[in-house]
């Protein structure tokens, strides 16, 4: 029976068919593994984005506290005495700033620099010697990993020509 060439032809066809099926299954398996790997990467990316978004929200809230500390320091420095109170507030302020710096937050002072609408929110315009320069800063700008987290709130100069 095995000497029959028709049987060998059928066996070869069957082996070829099964080999093709095996190759197709292997390719499908590789595609599924790649899809699964892409899915895992996408899920991890979304988790990281959500974490980063929550960090930014937290830092924005802390920055409001830092701005209030700066206002308190400016107010206290106008008066004589209370040196211990001043030192205590300055210590807390420095701790907050160190925490922010250690976490990628950069405070940017723009006073005396040209107005940049990407970094500033104009609260007032006052007459000045040069046009479009920041002459007063109510609140500083903050960057998080190079991205604007909070714009500076400023007064901009406007040159008046006669």
Image: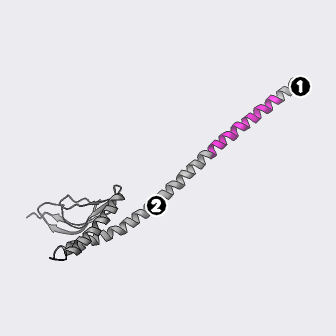
Please indicate whether residue 134 sits to the left or right of residue 24 in the image.
left
Judging depth in this view, the residue of 100 and 131 nearest the camera is 100
What colour-coding does the image apply? one colour
Expressed as whole percent of the image width and height from the top left, the position of residue 104 reads: 35, 57
Residue at image position (44%, 64%) is 54
Residue 149 showing in the rendered view = no
Q: Residue at x 66, y 43 (%)?
A: 29
The x and y percentages for residue 135 are: 17, 64
Query: Which residue carries the number 1 mark?
Result: 2
* Residue identified by numbered label 2: 51
- The mark tally for this picture is 2
Segment colored magenta = 11-32
Return the x and y of residue 148 as percentages of the image width and height: 33, 59
Q: Quadrant of residue 43?
A: bottom right
Q: Above or below — where is 155 with respect to 13?
A: below
Up-down relation of residue 58 to residue 23 (above or below): below
Q: Mark 1 Cα within 10 Å, few/some/many (few <14, many 20+)?
A: few
- In terms of secondary structure, where does tag 1 sit? loop
Query: For this view, does 45 lie left or right of residue 106?
Result: right
Q: Residue furthest front?
A: 84
Q: Is residue 14 magenta?
A: yes
Placement of 70 over or under 30, stated as above or below: below
Q: Position of residue 7 (x, y in %)?
A: 87, 27
Q: Main secondary structure of the magenta part?
A: helix
Seen at 20% across and 58% down, the residue is 114
Q: Residues within 10 Å of mark 2 (few under 14, many from 20)?
A: few
> Which image quadrant for residue 6?
top right
């Amino acid at each position: 029976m095995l000497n029959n060439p028709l049987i060998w032809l059928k066996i070869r066809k069957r082996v070829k068919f099964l080999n093709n099926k095996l190759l197709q299954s292997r390719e499908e398996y590789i595609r599924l593994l790649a899809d699964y790997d892409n899915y895992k990467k996408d899920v991890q990316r979304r988790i990281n984005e959500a974490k980063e978004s929550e960090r930014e929200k937290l830092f924005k809230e802390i920055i409001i506290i830092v701005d209030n500390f700066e206002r308190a320091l400016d107010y206290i420095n106008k008066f004589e005495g209370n040196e211990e109170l001043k030192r205590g507030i300055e210590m807390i302020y420095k701790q907050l700033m160190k925490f922010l710096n250690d976490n990628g937050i950069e405070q940017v002072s723009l006073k005396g620099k040209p107005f940049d609408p990407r970094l500033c929110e104009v609260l007032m315009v006052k007459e000045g010697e040069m046009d479009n320069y920041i002459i007063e800063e109510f609140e500083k700008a903050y960057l998080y990993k190079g991205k604007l987290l909070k714009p500076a709130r400023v007064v901009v100069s406007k040159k008046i020509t006669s």
